[in-house]
Amino acid sequence: MVSWFRRNKPESAAPRRLSTEDLAAAFPDAPAPAGDEVAPTTPPAPVVDTVPAPAEPTTPKSDPAPEAPPAPAGKPGWRERLRGSAFARSFGGLFSRNPRLDDDLLDEIETALLTADVGVTASTQLVESLRKRMKAREFADANALLRALRADLVALLAPVALPLRIDAGRKPFVILTVGVNGVGKTTTIGKLARRYKDEGRALMLAAGDTFRAAAVAQLQAWGERNGVAVVAQGQNADAASVAFDALQAAKSRGVEVLIADTAGRLHTQGGLMEELAKVARVLRKLDPEAPHEVLMVIDGTTGQNAINQVRKFSEKVPVTGLVVTKLDGTAKGGVVFALAREFGIPIRYAGIGERPEDLRVFDAEAFVDALLPESLG
């Protein structure tokens, strides 16, 4: 009887052999034995594939595209960047042959001027002056007429080719930048900051474009890049308050130049235009002569609408200087002549590229020479 119980008693003391599943659960990081595949009980975590895609197995990783170099110094830089304008293309094609000196040539010149946004009044005056001189037999050939046209265009721009002078007696010298949406005001401020910083001037920026979310961050990035302090508040803050705080800070720190940004606004938006006038009034509470320069930024591709923009902005704040941007590429370029004839406001700078060095002090002769062919043929 005793032996029977011994034979049928469970052998609990004997060690139990662990299965492959038990081992996998106890040691999840251990490699599975060959031939045994253990199905995971939960989905595996995603793994970042560092192997190059098979579609391009031998293509090395490309470096970021290098930044475009600035335009060459002097007149060659102007010609390089403006040769693609509608003005340059029209006159390049017109004088690519040796045209006959007659009324048809003058008609073609007038059409080219109008197409390039020089404006009806300025184009008519230029062509009629050439017509009278041609009738008086002042031109021996078309090349002589081309030289006369160049001289007339330079004479139209020379009175407005006045660089901006920082008055050391006005400290800080306050520059208020204005313009419609998308003309490049904030970028122009950043380039001006680089220019004045290179001249050794102490300056400060005011991030007054509080409507556009990225404008404050964009101006702060320019400030960090150039080592310039930026006064800013939150988005949708009162632009006049930002300008006021910036002028107070500039006075206390002995800053030489303060450049204030403003939000882009259409010249047809009466309420926003009144807000711009408010910024100027608030600045005058701290300095009766501020702003010392109202710099309006004009998009060179705008065309004749730029005339209306300048007229409307001048009704709210006295525009004292112009910056014409985006003249490189496909801009027509002729609006510069229309602005000069219509308003006589000094053209301080011209933008002929994306680099800070491409914001050039406006040069009437270099500008005209870049638009007209150097010679016939």
Image: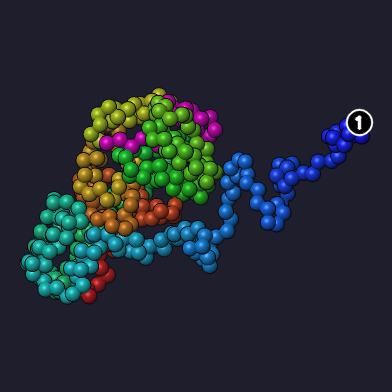
Residue 283 is at least partly visible in this image: no
Write down the residue under mark 1: 1
> Is 227 placed left or right of 38 in the picture?
left
> Is 292 placed left or right of 144 in the picture?
right
Disc 1 element: loop
Give the residue displayed 28% in from the left and 50% down from the top.
300
Residue at the extreme right: 2
Relative to the observer, which residue lies in front, 21 or 275?
21
Q: Quadrant of residue 369?
A: bottom left
Q: Quadrant of the N terminus?
A: top right
**Which scheme is used to colour this image of the protein?**
rainbow
Task: Residue 36: give x, y in percent of width and height.
Answer: 68, 53
Give the residue displayed 19% in from the left and 53% down from the top.
118
Residue 11 is at least partly visible in this image: yes
Q: Quadrant of the C terminus?
A: bottom left
Give the residue displayed 14% in from the left and 71% down from the top.
139
Q: Which residues are magenta?
A: 241-266
> Is 51 placed left or right of 124 in the picture?
right
Task: Residue 78: give x, y in percent of width and height.
Answer: 35, 61
Amino acid type at circle 1 is: Met
